[in-house]
Amino acid sequence: MTRTRCFVAFELAEESRAYVQERLAPLQTLLARELPLRLRPVPAANWHATLLFFPGLEDDERAALWEAVAADVAAGAWRGIGFDWQGFALWPTPRRPGMLCLVGADYPAARDWPLYGRLEQQPFAQADLRHVGRFVPHITLMRAAERRAVDAREAWTALAPRVPPLDPRAVRVERISLFLSVVSRERPIYPRVHSLPLD
């Protein structure tokens, strides 16, 4: 059996994705011209807000993981969920950015999600837990095209007044999905293994 990197994530509703793309377009032009770090767009089909990332799970472990996620969806664990999206931001910080993300406010209620209550059980215990303690929803929209440390604080501060604002009510997560974290230049889209609507 093969261990494969995978993750469980929320996906935006189609109209929300289109709205973010529309707001992002002028910012991409500004960043290309004024940011001291070259960023590449992430395909919109890959936009997601990760709940759990696994460095490697076997087929039967992924099946058990998704069975639990599907049970949580059926029980209404995420029904009507909404995040307070703050807007576009360099991630994790402008001091040393690696991405441009759509970032939401800290979401303390995530601690009550049944999925996070299973993290001492298998296969959930195999998740990368570095970002589980404090859930800050974020969706990667652009990635650094080069591996070098760049302090972008000054450039980002100068750009801030021109960053397109977002109406958080126009950005809605609609689905939860299980993806394989395997992409290449030839196949740039994460394979979606399972997906369910939240409501």
Image: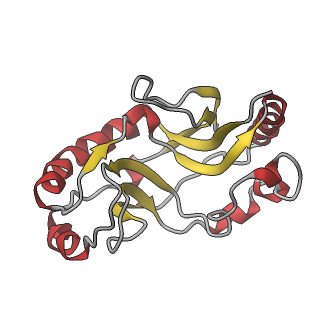
Residue 88 in percent (x, y) is at 32, 59
Q: Which residue is drawn at 15% across and 63% down?
A: 162
Picture quadrant where residue 195 is located: top right
Which residue sits furthest left? 33
> What residue sits 68% from the left and 69% below the top?
133
For the C terminus, the image quarter is: top right
- Residue at 31 percent across and 52 percent down: it is 146
Question: Within the image, what quadrant is residue 128 found in?
Answer: bottom right
Question: Compared with residue 62, is residue 137 higher up or lower down, i.e. above or below?
Answer: below
In the current view of this chain or complex, which residue is farthest to the top?
186
Residue 62 in picture, x, y percent from top left: 77, 34
* Left or right of residue 163, residue 59 in this image: right
Query: Who's the residue at 45% across and 30% down the image?
Result: 184
Left or right? Give the position of 174 relative to 189.
right
Query: How far across and how far down the image is residue 11, in percent?
Result: 52, 39
Quarter of the N terminus within the rendering: top right
The answer to whether 28 appears left or right of 54 in the picture is left
